[in-house]
Amino acid sequence: MHDDLIINPDLTLILGPEDEAYFLCPAAGVGQGAYWAVIHRRHGAWTHLYRIAQDRFSQRLLVHLVAYFEGECLEEARNALLPLRSSR
């Protein structure tokens, strides 16, 4: 697992020209990746919470949509991680 690919992944497949990505925190467990919030603006503002990890076999990035919010909701995305982090 290359941590630099998770902390600084190539997000070109999920980012549009006006979108912004925010690293939130590492995911629990070895190889589980990290959580990112992305604010998309192409069809109105939407915030997606993703878990991005590297596949152990193919070395490709795996992008999992965890939650989504209408509008620019960075704090809501952070707050959505609280139950996930407290259940560890």
Image (cartoon, helix red, strand yellow):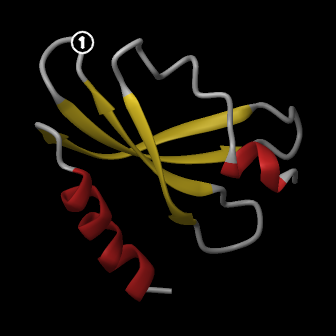
Q: Is residue 70 above or below residue 41?
A: below
Q: Is residue 60 above or below residue 56?
A: above
Closer to the camera in the image, 31 or 40: 40
Say few, some or many: other residues with alpha carbon within 10 Å of mark 1 (under 14 / 14 to 19 / 20 or more): few
Q: Is residue 23 above or below residue 27?
A: above
Q: Is residue 78 above or below residue 58?
A: below
Q: Residue at x 17, y 12 (%)?
A: 43
Give the residue at mark 1: 42
Closer to the camera in the image, 58 or 24: 24
Q: Percent x, y for residue 54? A: 75, 44
Q: Residue at x 12, y 19 (%)?
A: 44
Q: Percent x, y for residue 82? A: 32, 77
Closer to the camera in the image, 10 or 28: 10
Relative side of 5 to 85, left or right: right
The amino acid pointed to by label 1 is: Arg
Q: Residue at x 87, y 53 (%)?
A: 1
